[in-house]
């Protein structure tokens, strides 16, 4: 099973578990970090996410991942956590939910002499181009978009 297939299947399994725990699924990632694979399930809730909710999702999902269909997965660590304040925006629904909020856009290489741009998120079009303030950045230039955090 390839990483995209794993992510899609885990999303199917974990959505109802999230609902039972009183949170909603923000994202699922399966990536290699250093020498170890990480299966990261990120959840959210407008009122905040409590550790008990993450634990509930993790304990319910863990035995499901022991099913035969996941036998071909490499050894991994399961992590269930909150999206956090500086959450990464990746999916169209993330951009729609965060429209109007301040975001940090990081680029692969400088765009107009800058490696990062902070401004109000307007949205993301169907091609993945991101508009912040009155500037549109092409998908190919954008490394990541995160909510901006001010302390």
Image (tube, rainbow, N blue to C red):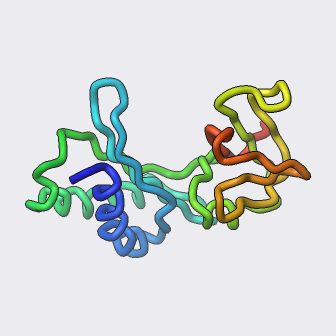
Residue 83: image x %, image y %?
54, 51
Q: How many marks?
A: 0
Q: Is residue 146 above or below residue 16?
A: above
Q: Which quarter shows the C terminus?
A: top right
Vertical order, 68 against 30 (above or below): below
Q: Residue at x 64, y 42 (%)?
A: 140
Q: Nearer the viewer, residue 136 or 41?
A: 136
From the viewer's perspective, tell me whether residue 138 is left or right of residue 50.
right
The residue that appears at 57% across and 60% down in the rendered structure is 91
Residue 124 percent coordinates (x, y): 71, 59
The residue at the point 37 percent across, 64 percent down is: 11
Q: Is residue 111 left or right of residue 75?
A: right
| Whether residue 47 can be seen here | no
Picture layout, residue 130 above or below residue 150: below
- The residue positioned 66% from the left and 65% from the top of the image is 126
Q: Position of residue 127 (x, y in %)?
A: 65, 59
Q: Is residue 115 above or below residue 130?
A: above
Residue 4 in the image: state x and y as whole percent. Answer: 35, 54
Is 148 left or right of 108, judged from the image as shown?
A: right
């Amino acid at each position: 099973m390839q990483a995209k297939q794993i992510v899609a299947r885990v999303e199917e399994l974990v959505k109802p578990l999230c609902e039972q725990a009183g949170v909603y699924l923000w994202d699922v990632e399966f990536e290699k970090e250093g020498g170890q694979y990480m299966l990261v399930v990120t959840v959210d809730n407008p009122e905040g996410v409590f550790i008990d909710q993450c634990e509930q999702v993790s304990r319910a999902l863990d035995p499901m991942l022991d099913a035969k269909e996941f036998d071909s997965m490499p050894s991994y660590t399961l992590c269930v956590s909150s999206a956090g304040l500086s959450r990464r925006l990746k999916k169209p629904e993330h951009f729609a939910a965060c429209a109007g909020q301040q975001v940090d856009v990081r680029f692969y290489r400088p765009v107009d002499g800058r490696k990062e741009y902070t401004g109000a998120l307007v949205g993301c079009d169907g091609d993945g181009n991101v508009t912040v303030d009155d500037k549109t950045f092409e998908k190919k230039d954008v490394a990541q978009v995160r909510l901006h955090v001010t302390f």
